[in-house]
Image (cartoon, rainbow, N blue to C red):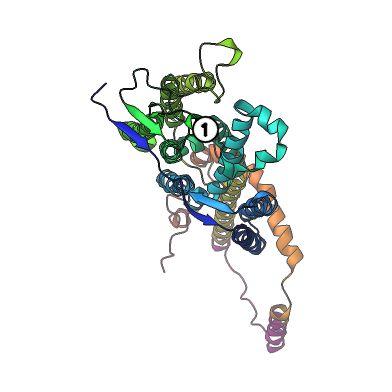
Amino acid sequence: MSSLPSVNWDLDPVFVSVPQTAVVVVAGAIALYSFFQGARTKGGDHNMTGILFAGLAFIAWKWMEHGLELRYYSMLFVGVFLGGYSLLKWQIVRGGGPAEDAGDFIVYGVLGVLVGARLGHVLFYDYEKALADPAWIFKIWTGGLASHGAVMGLIFAMFLFTRRRGIPFFEGADRFSFSAALGAGLVRLGNLLNSEIVGRKVPDQSWGFRFMRFSEDSHLDPRPLRYPTQIAEMLLGFGILGILYLFDKQMKGEKRPRGALISMFFALYFSGRFGVEFYKEYAGNGGMPLGLPITMGQLLSLPGVLIGLIGLALAFQKKLPAGWPSGRGDEVLAEEEEEAARRRRRKRNKRKRERAAALAAISASAEASSTPRTEKPEPASVDDDEAEEEDEAARESEPPDEDADEDEERDEDAEEGDAEEGDAEEGDADDDAPKKDVDPDVADEFDDKGSLKKRRE
């Protein structure tokens, strides 16, 4: 290992400081704008954004006494959301969904990551400190975010989002797997820039990183060389992103089974995390719980590995088709299909009535033509003509009878049930039904579909 380099890592993680007042004003302005947009468009997602930034403004006003130090880590976090949004949008649009769904999920994703990562760190790594100082839980800018908690927060956020939109959970999770891999890589790069989540000491001290700003080594002189496990996990995240892309391409995109992508991510990422944990510093980072020969990080990675492997097996066994639904919900789609079927039935009933009326008119005409006329009809008198014109004008001036229209619509609905029962037998019944005695000249006036031909003079 003597050929590997030794690096003195002494990068200031803060590149600009923002006063407390500016933080409160900016967060409050974003909250007010979001509430305004939510009231104008009646959109729940805007209101959720408003609640998020209103909460951030309150936290900054209450506890951020020395302002906000913008770190490289924070900027990379912004890159996680912007890059994750772009990848999620690409996946949703390719699956046939609207691009707006990707933007709407960002609100859920931000809340899921922040709340999940913070609570995960508190519960798994720093429970005693949280009990001693409960207000410290809200001071997320001081550090303390757990990736396992972030994953659980994102899972819960995806569950809420997909449930509200009427989207299968694994369909949404599959689309988000690319964003998760990108986030895993960028977050570990941020840990390196922050000189945190360091590796264990290299046994022979022949290579490694000296983290000059790592507080746990401040009393040591010289500072020990440690494994740069942040770089290993960063490469793990970016490598999984590339594998997911190749896997998706090999499965021909939308022809892959639902649940395969997110299961692949879980199996690869948590297996890699389990291996890296052998070189990561565990003292003060959860230790080895329950007297087990594995660290807290390895213990929390095992369920992820199992979920991934089981998910892959089920995905290729069931082979559910992938595809982003419209998000309108099953009830709305069922109503639209029922209305379309109702319109088709009404149209068929109307054609049948017209055909029956035409048959009746032709039969009456045939009977009238076969009966000899003995008397000529008397011409209408002038008084009768005037009376008919007055009656017609009166009928045209009357308003339409809405009750009659409603009665007619009810009659059409009543006929729908009979039409459905008769549709299956309609074709055979028309051929096998007994024919009435109709004059051959009159019968020629029908075509093979029962429609009237144009009369020949």
Residue hosting label 1: 147
Which of these two is toward me, 383 or 189?
189
* Magenta stretch holds residue 382: yes
- Residue 434 percent across, percent down from the top left: 54, 40
Nearer to the camera, 370 or 209:
209
Counting from the top left corner in percent of width and height, residue 91 is at 42, 43
**Amino acid identity at mark 1:** Ser
Q: Please check the rendered image and state whether residue 23 is part of the magenta-colored stretch, yes or no.
A: no
Under circle 1, the secondary element is helix
Image vertical order of residue 91 relative to residue 373, above or below:
above
Choose top left, top right, bottom left or bottom right for residue 134. top right
Identified at 66% across, 42% down, the residue is 138
The 10 Å Cα crowd at callout 1, few under 14, some 14 to 19, many 20 or more, is some
Image: magenta residue range: 368-393
Extreme residue toward the left, this view:
3
Q: Nearer the viewer, residue 167 or 133?
A: 133
Measuring 58% from the left and 40% from the top, which residue is drawn there? 112
Quarter that holds the C terminus: bottom left
The quadrant of the image that shows the N terminus is top left
Give the side of residue 453 with respect to residue 29, left or right.
left
- The reply to whether residue 162 is visible in this rendering is no
Q: Which sits in the foreground, 435 or 409? A: 409
Q: Position of residue 107 (x, y in %)?
A: 57, 48
Which residue occupies 62% across, 57% down?
20
Total residue callouts: 1
* Residue 70 visible to the viewer: yes
Q: Is residue 171 left or right of residue 333?
A: left
Question: Is 378 located above or below residue 345 in the figure?
Answer: below
Vertical relation: 153 (above or below) 435: above
Residue at 34%, 28% in the rendered image: 208
